[in-house]
Structures are given as C-alpha cells and as structure tokens.
Amino acid sequence: MGELASVIFTAEFLGNSLRFATPLILAAMGGVVNERTGVLNLGIDGMMLIGAFAAFAGSYFTGNPWMGVLIAVISCMLLGLLHAFTTITLVMNQVVVAVAINTFSMGLASSLLRTLFGTSTNALRSPGFSEIGWPQALKDLPFFGPVFFQQTIFVYIAILSVPVIWWVFYKTTWGLKIRAVGEYPKAAETMGVNVAKVRYLALLFAGAMGGLSGAALSITGLNTFIDNMTAGRGFIAFACIIFGRFHPLGAGLGALMFGLAQGLQLRIQTVGIPVAYQIPIMFPYILTLVLLVVMGSGAVPAAWGVPYYPDEE
C-alpha cells in the first residue's frame, strides 16, 4: 500500500484522472440540461457510442479531426431529435425510447464499422487531437503543468462547460424556463413558455454534448474505434447527474470522482498490488451502484419522466 500511496494523487495521476473524467463531464452536462426539463434520457450511452464512431469515421475519411467532431455532433443531435420526437410529440414511454436508442446505436455502430472498415480495425488509426500547444514554460510548471497544461481541447471544453451550464441555469431567462418546464410544465406554459420547444432544444443540446463526449473517447489517445467503446460510460454519466442532484456543479464533481476511480484502478494494476485485476476494474461500476443507491432520491424535478399533454387541465 505504501507503493500505491506514492503514485496516487501525483500530478500524473490527477492529469490522467481528468482525462478519464472528460467524456463523463461532457455527457453529464448535456444530460443535466435535458433532465432538468423533465425528460428522462437513459439513451446517453447510445449517443456517446454513435458520437465515438462518427468522430472516428469522419476523421478517418476526411483526414481532419475537427470534421470528425462536427459529424459526431450532428449525428448525435439527430439521435436527440429522434428522442424528442418520440417522447414529446408522440408521447411514447421515455424508458422504452431510451432502451431502443441504446440498442439501435450499438447495432448501427457495429454494422457500419464492419461495412466501412471490415472485420478488424486493429491497424486503423484516424487523425486525432493531441495536447494543446501551450508554451513550454506552462507545461513544465511543477504539478500544475502536467495536470492542466498537457491536455487536449476536450478537457478544457469539459471544464468550461460546467460553469457555463450553471450560469445558464441560474442567471439567464433560458435557465429559468428549463427549470420551470421540469418542475411544473403547465404553469410554465401558462406563463407563455413553449414546453415542447424547450424540451426539444434541451435534447438537441444533450445530443451535441453526447457527440463531443464520444469524440473525446475515439479521437484522442489511440484514435480508433472498437465495439461497445463506451463500456457503459453513458450510464455512469447518468449516475453523475443523480449524484449531483441535477445540478451542473454536482454532476461535474461526480464525473471527476469517477475519473479518479478509473485512474486509481489503472494505478493499482500498474504498481502490481497482488489483487485480482478484475477487482480494480470494477471500481467505477461499484461506485456507480453505490451512488445510485445512496443518492437515488431527492432533488428530482417534479415533472421528471412525466409525459406532458398541452391540452390537459
């Protein structure tokens, strides 16, 4: 344990944990917006998966990772639009729609992967994002350099998204509309708020953030795509929202905790502590389960998951 203590909570460990947390933060910030409008979105994992594939394929065929990001965002916004149309316009069951989106996304990504690239992508690498070219003096700063100045653009977008979403929620008219629609849509409509429009836009935004999240997975680091690449991260992002009590700062903190847990499980394997490797791998998922059980109630928007019928009294 002494060896483990010497390698955790170092600059390298915290920098890696921040990178692990980045896809979760991005997905959670999109999710917290649509959840606060009252729409239950369990399809975050499917959005992330399509985003990861679209970013990889887009970057591979265009040779430009920014095009990959753009294609990922558009693809996931289309999924968000599908979710909105089925749950808001058609008033279908939100859980069933989410399950359908996750299943559809997994099958679509796998089918397109084999159609476009064959049965193996081991040798395929797309152009991707590397560290931002900060001045070397910043990169070499003790402790802070590896943590904050040796990261890709996605890390900074994720960090900035948290205060931006908080500001929108609590300092703007749009934030007030989002919260009102999630708490009491009938009253919001009486005050002139277009409930359907707010929920549609929230799901489109969630899709865009899901696309960014998926791109952060596939076109940074290894710059490739594999089946089921998200490995349940979308559900972990959803757990972060629950843990954070539907607040952007709380959800961001939850995502950072999962990043630390993921970094810790890799560290345990690296330093050779004599435990079965399956045990540290389970850390993030055990943490998800614990947080959902402990924080699974409270601070839920009153209209969360409840279909809204504009004409009902």
Image: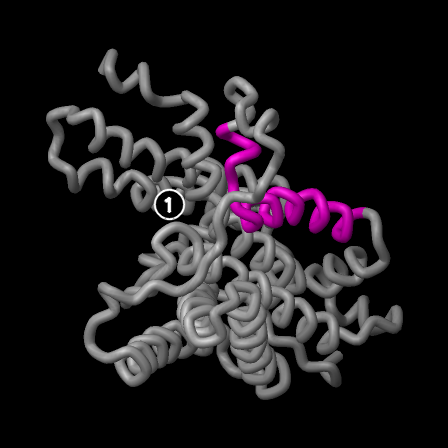
Specify how the rendered protein is coloured: one colour
Q: Residue furthest top?
A: 2
From the image, which quarter does the C terminus lie in? Answer: bottom right
Please indicate whether residue 8 sits to the left or right of residue 127 in the image: left
- The residue that disc 1 covers is 288
Q: Residue furthest front?
A: 136
Q: Residue at x 39, y 50 (%)?
A: 221
Q: Relative to residue 253, is residue 91 depicted above or below?
A: below
Magenta stretch bounds: 146-170
Residue 268 covered by magenta stretch: no
Q: Residue at x 22, y 30 (%)?
A: 270
Q: Relative to residue 42, is residue 4 depicted above or below?
A: above
**In the rendering, at what x and y percent does residue 213 appear?**
50, 58
Residue 101 placement: quadrant: bottom left
Please indicate whether residue 309 sits to the left or right of residue 272 in the image: right
The majority secondary structure of the magenta stretch comes to helix
**In the rendering, at what x and y percent does residue 185 appear?**
73, 68
**In the rendering, at what x and y percent does residue 99 appear?**
39, 73
From the image, which quarter does the N terminus lie in? Answer: top left
The one nearer the camera, 235 or 132, is: 132
Kindly state the secondary structure of the residue where label 1 is placed: helix
Q: What's under tag 1, amino acid-wise? A: Thr
**Residue 311 visible at all:** yes
The one nearer the camera, 105 or 187, is: 105
Q: Residue at x 70, y 43 (%)?
A: 163
**In the rendering, at what x and y percent does residue 138 appear?**
60, 27
Residue 155 covered by magenta stretch: yes
Q: Residue at x 33, y 61 (%)?
A: 229
Please indicate whether residue 255 sits to the left or right of residue 286 in the image: right
**Residue 98 visible at all:** no
